Image (cartoon, rainbow, N blue to C red):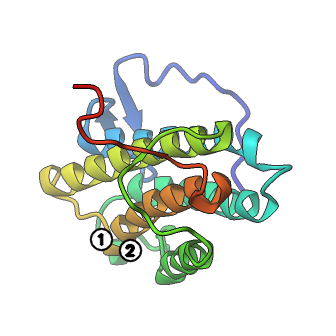
Amino acid sequence: MVKLNRIYTRTGDDGTTGLVHGARRLKSDPRIEAFGTVDETNACIGLARLHTGAGHPEIDRMLALIQNDLFDLGADLATPGDDASRGYEPLRIVPAQVERIAADIDRLNENLSPLRSFVLPGGSPAAAALHLARTVARRAERAMVAAARTDGEPIGAEALKYINRVSDFLFVAARAVNGNGSDDVLWVPGANR
């Protein structure tokens, strides 16, 4: 279990932060950007859960699991390098987490009305918050892909799959809380010309 006695350590005052194995990185490092954006995604989901708790308990339960998984993903990203050289097994996103979220997407998607157009973020407060979380999850995915291509330290395939599924889940969940799609706000191309 993690134990935090002090919130400020002053070690980041020089513009760096520590990875799990102790190495320091600039706070602008692509890997730091990636797990920082995963953290933003988690915060947005926390905000969305203010609107899902009472009216949508099944979705709220799924979101709670995702929030915990996003901390796992942050730990995965904060522990770069070869697993064999550590002497311990670092926390990694595993296929079971990807499979669980995919099954949740499928379960929610069964009841959704077919899409006739792109969906605009909105409809209900819960849907709007879930769409905001979705866009931040997509940014996290882009940051993870960029980090994987630039820092010379691979990001696991399951981690990339997981963040992609998170944004898919958030889209489907937003539609589910919008009356299973009946209250979606649809894009009308060229409507305001």
The residue indicated by pointer 1 is: 82
Q: Position of residue 86 (x, y in %)?
A: 40, 69
Please identify the quarter of the rendering in which residue 81 is found: bottom left
Secondary structure under tag 1 reads loop
Quadrant in which the N terminus is drawn: bottom right
> Position of 69 compared to 6: left or right?
left
Please identify the quarter of the rendering in which residue 67 is found: bottom right
Q: Position of residue 17 (x, y in %)?
A: 40, 33
Q: Nearer the viewer, residue 95 or 99?
A: 99
Q: Nearer the viewer, residue 168 or 86?
A: 168
Q: Residue at x 69, y 51 (%)?
A: 2
Q: Residue at x 22, y 59 (%)?
A: 153
> Position of 129 compared to 86: left or right?
right
Where 43 falls versus 90 (above or below)? above
Q: Residue at x 23, y 64 (%)?
A: 154
> Position of 191 compared to 162: left or right?
left
Q: Residues within 10 Å of mark 2 (few under 14, many from 20)?
A: some
The residue indicated by pointer 2 is: 158
Please identify the quarter of the rendering in which residue 87 is found: bottom left
Which circle, 1 or 2, is nearer the viewer? 2
Q: Residue at x 44, y 62 (%)?
A: 168
Quadrant in which the C terminus is drawn: top left
Q: Nearer the viewer, residue 95 or 61?
A: 61
Secondary structure under tag 2 reads helix
Tally the marks. Answer: 2
| Mark 1 touches mark 2? (CB < 8 Å) | no
Q: Position of residue 155 (x, y in %)?
A: 29, 63
Q: Gap in Å between the C-alphas at discs 1 and 2?
A: 15 Å
Residue kind at label 1, given as amino acid type: Asp
Residue kind at label 2, given as amino acid type: Glu
